[in-house]
């Protein structure tokens, strides 16, 4: 089982996270932001990752520190659970509909962080989540997981549906990329290392 258990405590947030890449989609999530809890639950279920996450953040300021720091810890957990990255498929992609919305996510677990993010959201907030924090969340995941990550909204109108499509597509793309392929000896790279 590829599992990581991390804690991170700063003056702004106190986070405890356990991630099992080979789980069943079991989850227990409390970030203090209901909509983010919902999105991370979808990530867990649709990627079939077991995720236990607790965060106490300075939400009296705004959601910035909480959302970004959770992205940092989730990214670090992905990297730790992957270990040497031997025998993983490495690449994953998903084109996912959510009613009128359609999101595309493609990623490479290359150890080369990069993010392309093109997801226009018309609402300043969805629930208690500041919409501009979506890109910051995925940037933090990308940098800390060593992941090249492309996220694009193909089309959509309803902000809830747009964000939901993105999180589900991310989950499915990541599940594809972390899959163990016994035919891959070492890492999938012509250089012999990632």
Image (tube, rainbow, N blue to C red):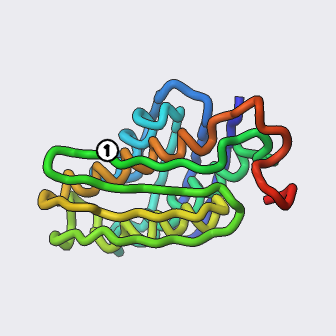
Q: Quadrant of the C terminus?
A: bottom right
Q: Is residue 50 visible?
A: yes
Foreground of the two, 85 or 139: 85
Image x and y of residue 44, in percent: 45, 37
Is 11 positioned to the left or the right of 25 in the image?
Answer: right
Compared with 46, 135 (above or below) is below
User: Which residue is painted at 32% across and 46% down in the image?
Assistant: 96
At x 41%, y 47%, the residue is 94
Query: In x, y percent, where is residue 84?
Result: 81, 48
Instruction: Relative to 63, say whether 1 is above or below.
Output: above
Residue 109 % position (x, y) = 65, 55
Rendered-image quadrant of the N terminus: top right
Q: Is residue 111 above or below residue 166?
A: below
Looking at the image, residue 37 sits to the left or right of residue 48; the answer is left
Which residue is nearer to you in this view: 80 or 153? Answer: 153
- Looking at this view, name the residue that lies furthest to the front: 190
Q: Residue at x 70, y 35 (%)?
A: 2
Is residue 33 visible in the rendered image? The answer is no
Choose between 190 and 6: the one closer to the eye.
190
- Mark 1 highlights which residue? 38
Total number of numbered discs in the rendering: 1
Query: In the rendered image, which quarter is residue 148 located in?
Result: bottom right
Label 1 residue SS: helix
Q: Residues within 10 Å of mark 1 (few under 14, many from 20)?
A: some
Query: With 151 as the anchor, is 147 left or right in this view?
Result: right
Tell me if 96 is positioned left or right of 4 in this view.
Answer: left
Residue 146 quadrant: bottom right
Image coordinates for residue 189, horizontal then vertical, percent: 78, 55
């Amino acid at each position: 089982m590829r599992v990581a258990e991390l804690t991170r405590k700063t003056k702004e947030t106190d986070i405890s996270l356990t991630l099992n890449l080979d789980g069943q989609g079991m989850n227990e999530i409390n970030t203090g932001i209901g909509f983010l809890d919902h999105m991370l639950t979808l990530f867990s279920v649709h990627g079939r990752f077991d995720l236990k996450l607790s965060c106490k953040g300075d939400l009296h300021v705004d959601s910035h520190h909480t959302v970004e720091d959770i992205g940092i810890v989730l990214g670090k957990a992905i990297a730790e659970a992957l270990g040497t990255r031997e025998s993983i498929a490495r690449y994953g992609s998903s084109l996912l509909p959510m009613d009128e919305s359609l999101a595309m996510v493609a990623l490479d677990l290359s150890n080369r962080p990069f993010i392309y993010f093109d997801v226009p959201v018309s609402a300043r907030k969805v629930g208690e989540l500041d919409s501009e924090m979506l890109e910051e969340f995925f940037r933090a995941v990308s940098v800390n997981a060593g992941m090249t990550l492309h996220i694009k909204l193909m089309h959509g109108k309803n902000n809830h549906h747009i964000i939901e499509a993105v999180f589900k597509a991310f989950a499915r793309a990541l599940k594809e990329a972390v899959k163990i392929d016994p035919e891959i000896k070492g890492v999938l790279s012509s250089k012999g290392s990632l």
